[in-house]
Amino acid sequence: MKTNKNITSWDNHIEKKYGKKGTKTRNEFDEGFEAFKIGVLIQEARKKQHLTQKELAEKVGTTKSYISRIENNASDIRLSTLIRIIRDGLGGNLNLSFDL
């Protein structure tokens, strides 16, 4: 069986492209990726509950365009807004953890 020696792990790929953890470019990438994940999680939860962006926005007291920007990683989100989206809009709870 032949193997492709050009295959690399995801971690090695990210390190090659953005640098080692702790460098400025890697930190910027990691921060952006976390924001992207939050938007995807909100979008998936909204769709699972069969809510439109407009319906979610109305439940939270914001606009459809703001929900869209969050889901598409085009807007920073305040913690208080994130909590309202999860609690009031989606009926959930926000749990945070830190890796030190």
Image (tube, rainbow, N blue to C red):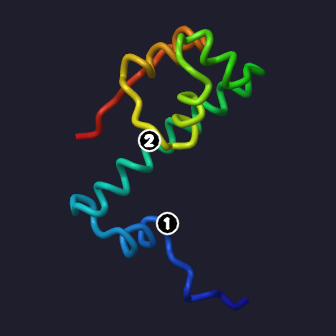
Residue drawn where x is 37% and y is 57% of the image: 29
| Disc 1 secondary structure class | helix
Residue 29's place in the image compared with 54, above or below, is below
Which disc, if any, is residue 80? none
Q: Which residue is mark 2?
A: 35
Q: Which residue: 43% across, 19% down?
A: 81
Residue 75 pos. (x, y %): 45, 38
Residue at (56, 80) in percent of width and height: 7
Q: Position of residue 28 (x, y in %)?
A: 31, 55
Q: Is residue 56 left or right of residue 75?
A: right
Name which residue type carries label 2. Answer: Ala
Q: Secondary structure at mark 2?
A: helix
Q: Quadrant of residue 63?
A: top right
Q: Earlier in the sequence, mark 1 or mark 2?
A: 1
Q: Which of the 4 image quarters holds residue 47? A: top right
Residue depicted at 36% across the width and 22% down the height? 79
Q: Locate residue 18, reporting x and y percent.
A: 35, 68
Numbered disc in front, either 1 or 2 = 2
Q: Is residue 99 above or below residue 78?
A: below
Question: Is 25 situated left or right of 47 in this image?
Answer: left
The residue tagged 1 is: 10
Task: Give x and y (percent) for residue 53.
Answer: 67, 25
